[in-house]
Amino acid sequence: MNKKILVIGDYEAAKWHPLKGVDERLEQILKGYDVTCTDDYSRLTSDELKKYALLINYADAWQTNGTRQSAGAIISYVAEGGSILTLHSGIIMRSTPEMELMQGGRFTGHPEACDLTYTPTDIKHPILDGIQAFTVFEEPYRLTLAELAEHEILMTYSHDGQDWAAAWTLLYGMGKVVYLSIGHQAKSFENEMFAKLILNSVKWCEVNDV
């Protein structure tokens, strides 16, 4: 049986990053998995999340649709051994500081979108297998790393004369967390390297070695 993945995002409620188009690309990238894409935040309960091997978080309207209850369910899910892959805007979840710690950082804003080159760090990690530097049209997300989280920074980008963290992993309780700041629009998911980065992230989350 294929492993089940739940993707949470927004269709009509999305102001900046709609799930439409991205959902199709994720289903293609993860064609070996049983992928369910939804904008139904009521599914973010402990009982429902236990049905899935991985939660992919592409939420855009969390501040409207997210609740402390759904945040608590996600945190418990990961702490008890689930995995979460957060893409781009999914990190903008301010309903609870615990969510910020679990995801490893906080979004603080971004300059105008432009062509950005994402470069792997020197760290040895399965998610970086076969990954080379690549350039996509993206929003230069500014992120403050959670001080108590033990990150492994996987990729950076340069902008305004400074290097910025763009992807990381961390362990939270018994679960795994991956954050990729790329994913502003569906076209980004057509980039071969970004698609491989997503697939590698999912495969890493599958391995129960925490």
Image: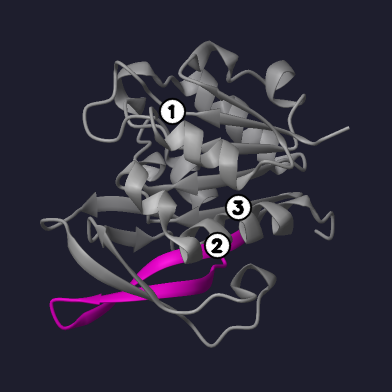
Q: Which residue is mark 2?
A: 197
Name the residue located 73 percent from the left edge and 38 percent from the top edge.
Answer: 33
**Is there a contact, CB below 8 Å, between mark 3 and mark 1?**
no
For the N terminus, the image quarter is: top right
The residue that label 1 is drawn on is: 9
Q: Secondary structure at mark 3?
A: strand
Q: Is residue 67 left or right of residue 60?
A: right
Q: Is residue 9 magenta?
A: no
- Residues drawn in magenta: 150-170
State the separation of the CA atoms marked 2 and 3: 14 Å
Q: Residues within 10 Å of mark 3 (few under 14, many from 20)?
A: many
Residue 47, horizontal then vertical, whole percent: 73, 17
Amino acid marked by disc 2: Leu
* Image-based side of 80 in relation to 84, left or right: right
x, y percent for residue 38: 51, 20
Instruction: Tell me the colour scheme of the image.
Output: one colour
Q: Hey, which residue is sitting farthest right in the picture?
A: 1
Q: Which residue is mark 3?
A: 177
- Spatial separation of the CA atoms under disc 1 and disc 2: 19 Å
Q: CA distance from mark 3 to mark 1?
A: 17 Å
Of callouts 2 and 3, which one flags the residue occurring earlier in the amino acid sequence? 3
Q: Which quadrant does the C terminus fall into?
A: bottom right
* Crowd tier of the residue under label 2, counting other residues whose Cα lies within 10 Å: few below 14, some 14–19, many 20 or above: many
Q: Amino acid at mark 3?
A: Val
